[in-house]
Amino acid sequence: MIEKILLAVSGLGHAEEMLKTLKEIPSIQQAKVTVLHVVPAQNTAAAMTGKWEEGGKILANAIQTLNLDPSQVSSILRQGEPKDVVCQVADEIDADLIIMGSRGLKRLQSILSNSVSQYVFQLSSRPMLLVKDDIYVKKIRRVMVAIDNSDAAKHCLSLALFLLRDIPGGQLILSNVTTDLRGKTSEVSEISPEKNPTLAAAVAEAQRQGVQARCFTSSGKPGEEICRLAEELNVDLLLLGSPDRRPSVAKSFVDIDRLVGASLSDYVRVNASCPVLLARTVA
């Protein structure tokens, strides 16, 4: 399911560390990795030359840090607008997963500071793993999926089981949040899946693949509750589905309500205390 990974590096953040952690997972170990660094256009030839040299060093350092089998890794240094180039290269190599660092910018900051990771998520339909600069990347053992009846959530469940099925002692945490329009939150409760049909179906699938699963519910504002559950349950990786609500004629346009922070995926991207894998399915 994940055979080709695009790692976009900037010389900052924890993206390389995240990939090294992923590569410890048996189901990921044979995946091919393309490491990309994008050099933005400069005003002068001298400045452009300097940026190319700097970009080459960033790529070399990233590959050295990853310490992968040379047959499994390649590198690309390309000039252009970073958010556009990342999407282009992801399409060129047919990436199954994009990994990027993220500054965790909120609302209009993402637009005003030209947040590359946020724009790439808007413009690509591929799963994207975002690693904020201020989090600690842990060995992956506890993977949480925010589960409901949507196709996007089911896609996340499939990805989580792909990652967990060969991890000794790996644990799937299924969370189901009931929206409370009044904003009132409830205690985090572990429940038997038989009491919740959505969770029951997910647990049955996990059992078929030999993955241990636990179920938790709460109520309140979904974004806040998902982040709270992830933190309280000490989750190593959070998977969240994000349906694409744009019509097919508008796929090249950014979904503005997500950029200003009105969506669940945007809230979780900014506020989660662990790496977040956002998987989109087309509505």
Image: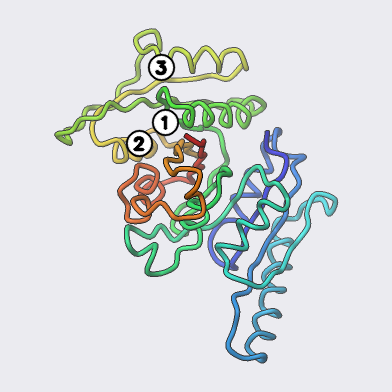
Residue that label 2 marks: 226
**At numbered mark 2, what does the secondary structure look like: helix, strand or loop?**
helix
**At numbered mark 3, what does the secondary structure look like: helix, strand or loop?**
helix
Point out residue 266 in the picture as x, y percentages from the top left corner: 38, 48
3 or 2: mark nearer the eye: 3
Residue that label 3 marks: 198
Q: Is residue 267 left or right of residue 277?
A: left
Point out residue 233 in the picture as x, y percentages from the top left corner: 39, 33
Q: Is residue 207 left or right of residue 146?
A: right
**At numbered mark 1, what does the secondary structure look like: helix, strand or loop?**
strand
In this view, 214 is above or below 276: above
Which quadrant of the figure has residue 26? top right
The reply to whether callout 1 and callout 2 are in contact (CB within 8 Å) is: yes
Measured Cα–Cα span from mark 3 to mark 1: 11 Å
In this view, 224 is above or below 217: below
Residue that label 1 marks: 146
